[in-house]
């Protein structure tokens, strides 16, 4: 019997996953949590074979929880859950030690099969997403340009960006011009959207990853 912990803060989603997996003859949900801070302590206590962890948990986000779980209880294999997947989210999940990556709207049978395969020692990743991650464009922006764009993403005017980053207004304008040219955008808003979709501009709050839609670009 494969024992599973489910970490999902949305009660209806968590309840649906519990019902789905409990209907399987070889899988048993032994623990449920709705907060990121509870993931590792609950796993250390219950010792599940597989932990299904939502990326956007409140408190300790899912990626940080998976990384800590991988260090403290490597026998428990983490599978990341997300509403909308991006290549960067996948790469970060793999960096955190996750053994699987599942989109929440995947067909019901795929979740149970993912649990079985991960419990059996396999790494389970959607093929199309894996290919997209391999072929995702390299980030053309420098670290400083990303800093400028990150503040610009908050809707701050040039003078405020300059103040926060200890730059002159002219320097900020130059950075913004280079950013637009590099990413092929006409406006700052478009540049932010392109950078977020490509995964170059990662949100401070990982829960916002569900709001970022990945588009394959020609």
Image (cartoon, rainbow, N blue to C red):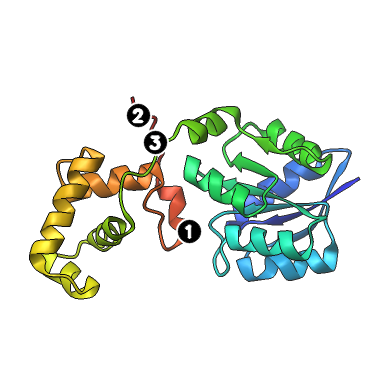
Q: Say if residue 9 shows up in the picture.
A: no
Residue 79: x and y in percent read 68, 48
From where the camera sits, is residue 186 visible?
A: yes
Q: Nearer the viewer, mark 2 or mark 3?
A: 3
Q: Earlier in the sequence, mark 1 or mark 3?
A: 3
Q: Which residue is mark 1?
A: 206
Q: Are marks 2 and 3 in contact (CB under 8 Å)?
A: yes
**Labels 2 and 3: the sequence-earlier one:** 3
Residue 45 falls in image quadrant: bottom right
In the foreground, 30 or 218: 218
Dividing the picture into quarters, in which one does residue 20 lie?
top right
> In the structure shown, which secondary structural element does the residue marked by tag 3 occupy?
loop
Distance of label 1 from label 3 (alpha carbons): 21 Å
Residue, far left: 170
Counting other residues with Cα less than 10 Å from the Cα at mark 3, is it few (<14), some (14-19), or many (20 or more)? few
> Residue at horizontal 43%, vertical 55%?
208
Residue 217 bears which disc, if any? 2
Q: Residue at x 13, y 62 (%)?
A: 171
Residue 75 position within the rendered picture, expressed as x and y whole percent measured from the top left: 83, 55
């Amino acid at each position: 019997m494969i024992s599973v912990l489910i970490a999902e803060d949305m009660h209806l989603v968590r309840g649906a996953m519990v019902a789905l997996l409990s209907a399987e003859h070889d899988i048993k949900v032994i623990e449920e949590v709705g907060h990121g801070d509870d993931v590792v302590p609950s796993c250390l206590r219950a010792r599940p074979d597989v932990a299904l962890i939502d990326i956007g948990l409140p408190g300790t986000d899912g990626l940080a929880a998976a990384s800590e779980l991988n260090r403290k209880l490597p026998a428990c294999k983490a599978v990341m859950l997300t509403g909308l997947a991006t290549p960067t989210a996948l790469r970060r999940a793999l960096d955190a030690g996750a053994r699987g990556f599942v989109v929440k709207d995947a067909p019901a049978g795929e979740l149970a099969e993912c649990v079985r395969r991960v419990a059996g020692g396999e790494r389970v990743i959607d093929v199309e997403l894996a290919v997209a991650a391999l072929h995702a464009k390299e980030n053309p922006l420098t670290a400083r340009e990303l800093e400028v764009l990150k503040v610009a993403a908050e809707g701050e005017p040039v003078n405020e960006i300059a103040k926060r980053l200890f730059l002159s207004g002219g320097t900020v304008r130059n950075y913004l011009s280079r950013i637009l040219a590099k990413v092929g955008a006409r406006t700052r808003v478009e540049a932010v959207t392109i950078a977020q979709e490509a995964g170059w501009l990662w949100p401070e709050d990982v829960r916002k990853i569900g709001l970022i839609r990945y588009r394959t670009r020609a």
